[in-house]
Image (cartoon, coloured by chain):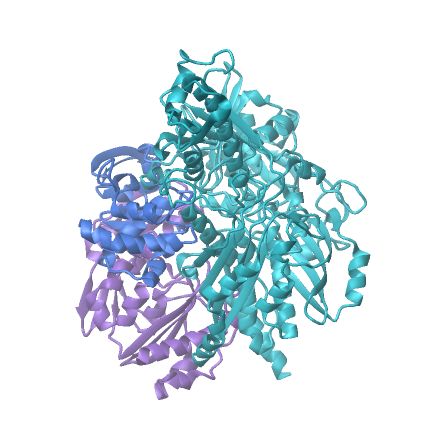
Chain colours: A blue, B purple, C cyan
Amino acid sequence: MSISVSMTVNGKAVSGKVEARTLLVQFLRENLSMTGTHVGCDTSQCGACVVHVDGQSVKSCTMLAVQAEGAKVMTIEGLAPSADKLHPMQEAFRDNHALQCGFCTPGMVMSAVDMVKRHNYQLDEATVRRELEGNLCRCTGYHNIVKAILAAAPAMKAAGV
Amino acid sequence: MYDFAYHRAKSAADATALLKGKSEGRAMAGGMTLIPTLKQRLARPSDVVDLAGAKDLAGIKAEGGGLTIGAMTRHGAVATSTEVKSTIPALASLAGHIGDPQVRNRGTIGGSVANNDPAADYPAAVLALGATINTTTRKIAADQFFKGLFETALGEGELITSISFPKPEKAAYVKFPNPASRYAMVGVFVAKTAGGVRVAVTGAGPGVFRVKAMEDALAKNFSSAAIKDIKVPTDGLNSDIHGSAEYRAHLVGVMARRAVDAASK
Amino acid sequence: MTAAPTGIGARVKRTEDQRFLTGRGRYVDDLALARPTYAYFLRSPHAHAKIRSIDTAAAAAMPGVVRIFTGKDTAEAKVGSLICGWVVKDKDGNPHKAPGHPPIAIDTVRYVGDTVAMVVAETASQARDAAEAIKVDYQVQPACVDLARALDKGAAQVHPEAPGNLCYDWEIGVKADVEAAFAKAAHVTKLDLVNNRLIPNAMEPRAAAADYDAGTGQYTLWSTSQNPHVLRLILSAFVLGIPEHKLRVVAPDVGGGFGSKIFCYADETLVVWAAPRVGRPIKWTAERNESFQTDAHGRDHVTHAELALDKDGKFLALKVETIANMGSYLSTFSTAVPTYLYATLLAGQYTTPLIYANVKAAFTHTAPVDAYRGAGRPEATFVIESIVSKAAAELKIDPAELRRRNFIPSTAFPYQTPVALQYDSGNYPPIIDEATKVSDYKGFEGRRAEAKSRGKLRGIGFSSYIEACGLAPSQVIGQLGGGVGQWEAAQIRFNPTGNVQVLTGSHSHGQGHETTFAQIVSDKLGVPLEQIEVVHGDTATTPFGMGSYGSRSLAVGGSAIMKAADKIIAKGKKIAAHLLEASVADIAFENGTFKVAGTDKAVPLGQVVFAAYVPHNYPITEVEPGMDENAFYDPANFVYPAGTQVCEVEIDPETGTTEIVSFTAIDDFGNIINPMIVEGQVHGGIVQGVGQALLENAVYDKSSGQLISGSFMDYTMPRADDVPSFKVGYKVTPCPHNPLGVKGCGEAGAIAAPAAVMNAVRDALGPLGVRDVPMPATPLAVWQTIQGAQRKAAE
């Protein structure tokens, strides 16, 4: 059954035809060709698909596209303020070598941004590690991801993002 | 996932109407269990009625000294609610440790309680606190609500609208997560309320259950020492690669003592 | 040498990060193809069954279905068997048993996940919908699942070609000499170990897409491969018979491999094979549950080991008996892993003069087992470092001290071990000294006492590992039965405007080659980093390469780049000599400039390159125009990284939970090009090793052969809160035989960590009388071990 769905993705109004069973991540990847959001598992655990929906981090593999009707969606492609300037979290990931193969990275970064904001820019190592429960990385051993998030929190505060 | 017809409900009444006559229809709250189940093709509903737009199902209200929490209230909202933190801090803490942050942003209390997953956290709180489950048709006491593995007292088309919790004198929830799934392998909610002491266990068996021997001992002496010699029988407990029935039974004792200590602080 | 910030040794930020951080990475599943179709593979739900019949009629009539293929189709088309590229000869000199491995099962399925049919449809969902409508009549057979029983009489048989499920019975060393040494030993330590089976779980699931151009007869396969040329070679020469020049394999951005993406799998084979039959491009991406069932698994050994020591604690001899699981079919390099990558490492860092190892490889009705990060070397390290620590505990010798007593002295290199390898370089005592210092080993007993006051059991464990990596000298590989050369190729192509493309046969799937390799070229040729582009992963554009695994990219691939750079300089000198009117012998090259020695006459490399492409004033009769050089590098030996890890744990005896409270790794990787990247490799490796020690376990039901740990719900992946931050450091002894002086760093963490963690757990439980704990030391396993010890103490 074909259903029309409309939402705002990274500030742009988009719409498309989907099935009821189409997941938000499929809509992003297949309908919009925005392939930055990844799928790494089928049990809603790896977090490679994390995006923001109305300002909250969600797993786009565990939300139907139709559930995002009218929502404001932000993906990894929309995080950087401009083509030549990265978001402080992206910058911190690069500076701290918090990514290797890059596959978990989009979800990791989107979760991290949400985490910093929810904790009002105040984080410690134990909190960061606990808050990353929904994001798996097989390359980095998390060491540098934790470092990057701790470094990004004050940088985000300073940048007012 | 098999395809289905999708409907948006604007209210609880609307949802009930949409589900009427659809024997293979399913209500969807946060979808944190339903969507993974559909993805694995373990369920094939004809219709899915999305409750997200039912405004009358969300929200946290102080009522009669306790709290009434709307069925569509997300775990994250319960965890961070100043109302919940001041009235039943153990409940806020429990909600703040369900799943991961993304699950807490979508998952709801009503969905969790209606699903009655044997490893879910909320059923332990509902049972230990002696909460009342308010539905589209009636009020159900916690003791009458949970019926074992994924089974509840809810009838066809009956939806949870809210859950009313009394304010406990003391309460705490401590869980031992499954190392892989992070669901509760054993979770124990201990509460001392006007109605007495209750100890509810999730994760260990086919459904949430109370430990009478511990409740009796704690009613006399609310201290972890009072229950240290109480052994939980292994009969009927779950056993899998992460925990034998013996291990789970043992953990019930450990988690219960830790919960009593936490509640006593 | 160029200035510090971009050259060798600099912590240069990675070039590739920009695209990964902004969602512009391009992985196989991201590929947009015109008019694509989608494949879904129907997989066996049984570990062992005969296929009586397959009825695809109902499925073929489902919406969107384009074609359905079964084993009958591939057999009729004479599709070849998937191959194992390494011949291991058994004790009697016979080659290993090599039963066929059809990409689609023909009449028998041999593991849960074995391919039964391929459905191609307009959408992925339709393909899966249709696959469910295929009716397969299975006659279920008893399955052989338990490795420890696989070679027993009466075990269910996996292949008629391999009686008793024995793939090979292989040995190294002289058994009689070892037995004689044991007879004279003052002490013998004995140990039984199970090296738990692991599932690699790179975060990007395997994927393949294929297209066929009927006009040119050209096939293109996009695959999540660590070695696209090797994949092309196997598909061309052995499986599909497509001429090598008519098959292009592209491995674009690949989301982690850890060994699991080395191999040639049924899925990608079938996608290529089916593309011309369907007449449209075909895409396939594994769902995670398929990755669990069908990616080649790792480890899975059952071992008995004995160590003989003299009265001073010097090792006299080691004997090891291992049964290694091959799974149902032989994966691409499976046979080599428990032999040449395992038993040849059993000397470790020690002077043990006599070693005997016997390895029996067994078939079981489980997924194929092959190389996984470390491949054989973690298994060897686990045996050695477990038994050394156990000996130390039995003899009441400090475990660090017992290791020091037996280390190969730094003066003994090159050192010939009794198990074939010749270690080229190393200096082990300063490494363990640094590790004990950084981990505050001296203060440990104080911390143990403090933990005890809180009701916790604290333990500390060492693991001093060595690995042979940087695969490898081709002649040695050939002598040992390997079917390929193990050199690497590189090409340095200057463009007329002076910027550079570095084409490499290595493949980066997270290791940061685009940065590290550019640093080498920048350092060597004085070209700014921003003007260097590293190109990899496409057989159409890069020179033939053997790919990335076995920590070989820098030692072998990087060395090939150095050789190509040498050729650039040599050619440049001839051109510069002409331009500067000097003799070639007088030209020196430094900091990107050719100079006439002893004068101030100089010409920058960029100008030489320009002259090579615009050869107006040029020694055209002696020197070809252009500046584009390639090189092949075949190493003289393996490289031998070594190090010591120290792990400290705290166990909650009430729940059995183990927390890693401190972890130190001091490594010798030879010279380091980019310390930031190397540290990242170490961190990741450690966590995979910690995962093996405490969390991860591939569990099959012993009778049905169902994969119980078949999703992240039951297979415990390490999460951020399972591990601490790490203390890492280096000692450097440069590799003497490659031009960069480098060793390898990709696998070290995973090789050493299981033993470090398990030794710490054993140490923590030692006061309870516990000597051994099964791996992984999950809370359940630790609790049961404690219960057992308490029962024993009460008796």
Query: What number of labels is visible?
Result: 0
Q: Quadrant of residue B181?
A: bottom left
Picture quarter containing residue C523? top left
> Picture coordinates of residue A96 (x, y %)?
35, 49
B235 to the left or right of B92: right
Position of C246 with respect to B260 (left or right) is: right
Looking at the picture, tell me which residue is in the foreground, B190 or C14: C14
Give me the residue at 41% from left, 86% from top: B226
Residue C44 quadrant? top right
Q: Is residue B32 left or right of residue C247?
A: left
Can the viewer see residue B240?
no
Q: Residue at horizontal 36%, vertical 65%?
A: B121
Task: Give B24 or C630, whichever is nearer the viewer.
Answer: C630
Please state, as top left, top right, bottom left or bottom right, where the N terminus of chain B lies in the image: top left
In the foreground, C312 or C39: C312
Q: Is residue C102 visible?
A: yes
Residue C132 is situated, as x and y percent measured from the top left of the image, at 51, 39
